[in-house]
Amino acid sequence: MIQSDVDPSVKAGAKADLSDYKTWLEFQEKSKLTVTKYLQDIQKFIQFVGKDRSRILKKHIVAYKADLIAKYKPVSVNSYLSSLNSYLVFLKQSALRVKIVRIQRKTSLNNVPSETEYNALLAAAKARSKTRLYYLIRVLASSGIRVSELKYITVEMLKEGKTFVYSKNKIREIIIPDRLCAELRQYCAEFGIQNVVFHGRKPDTLIDKARIWRELHEIAAYAGIPAEKAHAHNFRHLFAKTFLANHHDLVDLADILGHSSVETTRIYTRTSSPEKRERINALNL
């Protein structure tokens, strides 16, 4: 394990063993993906420090932050800094932590497909005989679940039309509309699906995200819809905006989406840039 030095500095040998940090992250109940990312990020930091890695000071950390800002977008910078700050806490060197980059809150929610564009994508999926993709899009748009949570959509859960998922350290209920459940049961029976509905090569594994991305872009091009709108996560946004427009219940929507704070959900009360422009032009001032 890397030992902390006197003064506000940290020893980090060239062959720093991060296994203890990995164990610590797992003890913090971080997901496997998070653990992998943090370890990769710290390796990046150690590589940046280079010859000074045997004695890391605050000035090295500040220089690393400046280098990140010069190369990456603010969201990515903060992601790297979050990993680094976590590592410093592990080393009991919280005094060396750096502040994240302040990002202006979004004032617009762009690239969410309209209802017309959504229907065009569904039509394109049917025309291209992408039956699985057709139902995948409908599930995302009618339930608000994340792509990674599609693994919870199984033949068994379709019997009741609901299931509980564990994501981001929270357990929440996911509900699939009755009519869609009936269609999915028929779809599974027709194609002999017995486990995960949107499975990959193995019946108990989820379809590869990269494949979803490729197929979505293929049907978007076929339908003449901007590629940036054919992103799987945008269907979660579409669900949220549609739900809010019909029910005007921000608290209920936050619960459905699994948000810890209603403030996170407030983004769905915002309009897109084109909608703002339309409203401003209508003022005739």
Image (cartoon, rainbow, N blue to C red):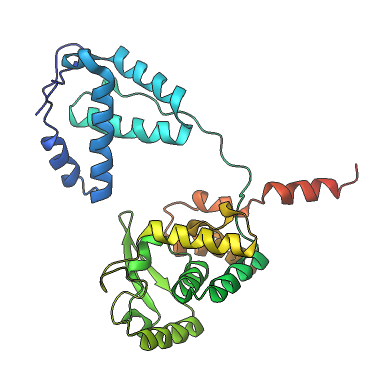
Residue 82, given in percent of the width and then of the height, sits at 34, 34
Quarter of the image where one finds residue 44: top left
Residue 20, given in percent of the width and then of the height, sits at 11, 36
Residue 14, given in percent of the width and then of the height, sits at 14, 21
The one nearer the camera, 176 or 195, is 195
Quarter of the image where one finds residue 158: bottom left
Q: Is residue 35 left or right of residue 108?
A: left
Q: Residue at x 45, y 87 (%)?
A: 182
Q: Residue at x 28, y 41 (%)?
A: 37
Quarter of the image where one finds residue 11: top left
Q: Residue at x 65, y 62 (%)?
A: 114
Q: Is residue 26 left or right of residue 98?
A: left
Residue 283, given in percent of the width and then of the height, sits at 87, 47
Height in image: 250 above or below 67?
below
Q: Quadrant of the N terminus?
A: top left
Q: Is residue 266 left or right of residue 160?
A: right
Q: Residue at x 43, y 64 (%)?
A: 145
Residue 61 visible in the picture? yes
Q: Quadrant of the C terminus?
A: top right
The one nearer the camera, 258 or 50, is 50
Q: Is residue 244 left or right of residue 136?
A: right
Q: In the displayed image of the protein, which residue is found farthest to the right? A: 284
Q: In the displayed image of the protein, which residue is found farthest to the left? A: 1
Residue 251 visible in the picture? no
Height in image: 273 above or below 87?
below
State the count of labels: 0
The one nearer the camera, 92 or 121, is 121
